[in-house]
Amino acid sequence: MSLPGNAIEPLSFREALGHYASGITVISSHVDGEPIGFTCQSFYSVSMSPPLVSFSVMSSSASYPKIRQAGRFAVNILSGEQVNISNQFARKGTDKWHGIDWQESPLGNPIIAGSLHWLDCEIHAEHAAGDHLIVIGEVKALNLQEAVATQPLLYFKGQYRNLAAHSAV
């Protein structure tokens, strides 16, 4: 516990936030004939009207400036079977798209095969927040097809997780 005036230790803060389960996405775009993407767990809905979503990315990201240049991005919501894709897109300095099956979205963004769902967005706003940027996108297209996979890829307490098979409450 930290009191007013006392600094929060970064590792304690990270551990505390690890108790909040989140889905895993890959944010992707296409610039100068090159697909770009990174793993992102800080993704959420913002508004129903207009349809807005948001993600947070490190200010030092090598991928995001190219996405900003494109002015558009896709959110690939990963399935429970896509742990390797999550890991591959989380690495720096590698060919993240090696062996990845994808197709172009209506806006020209890469859509990763086997994802649970995708959202095609144009950048609506960007805000600096500490060591991150908060990016807001307006959804212009989305996947309305029935997803093949039924389980999302989740992250909780530093590990990938699956939903237990049970009825909805």
Image: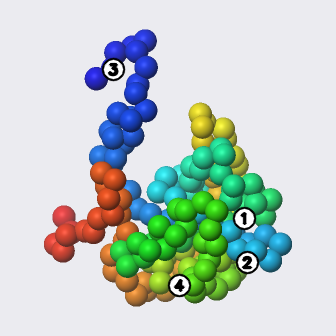
User: Which part of the image, by quadrant, shows the C terminus?
Assistant: bottom left
Horizontally, is 112 left or right of 158 in the view? Answer: right
- Write down the quadrant of residue 92 in the picture: bottom right
Residue 2: mark in rendering:
3
- Write down the quadrant of residue 168 in the picture: bottom left
The earlier-in-sequence mark between 1 and 2 is 1
Residue found farthest to the right:
32
Which amino acid does the dot numbered 1 rest on? Arg
Which amino acid does the dot numbered 2 rest on? Gly
Question: Horizontal and vertical percent for residue 53?
Answer: 57, 57
In 3D space, how far apart are the residues under numbered discs 3 and 2 (Cα atoms)? 47 Å
Residue 108: mark in rendering:
2
- Write down the quadrant of residue 116 in the picture: bottom left
Circle 2 Cα neighbour tier, 10 Å, few/some/many (<14 / 14–19 / ≥20): some
The earlier-in-sequence mark between 3 and 1 is 3
The earlier-in-sequence mark between 3 and 2 is 3
Q: Secondary structure at mark 1?
A: strand
Q: Which residue is mark 1?
A: 72
Q: Residue at x 19, y 69 (%)?
A: 164
Depth check, mark 3 against mark 1: the one in front is: 3
- Figure disc tally: 4
Q: Secondary structure at mark 3?
A: loop
In 3D space, how far apart are the residues under numbered discs 1 and 2 (Cα atoms)? 9 Å
Toward the viewer: 47 or 132?
132
Which amino acid does the dot numbered 4 rest on? Ala
Circle 4 Cα neighbour tier, 10 Å, few/some/many (<14 / 14–19 / ≥20): some
Q: Secondary structure at mark 4?
A: loop
In 3D space, how far apart are the residues under numbered discs 3 and 4 (Cα atoms)? 44 Å
Circle 3 Cα neighbour tier, 10 Å, few/some/many (<14 / 14–19 / ≥20): few
Residue 104 appearing in the image: yes
Whether the residues at callouts 1 and 2 have beta carbons within 8 Å, the answer is: yes
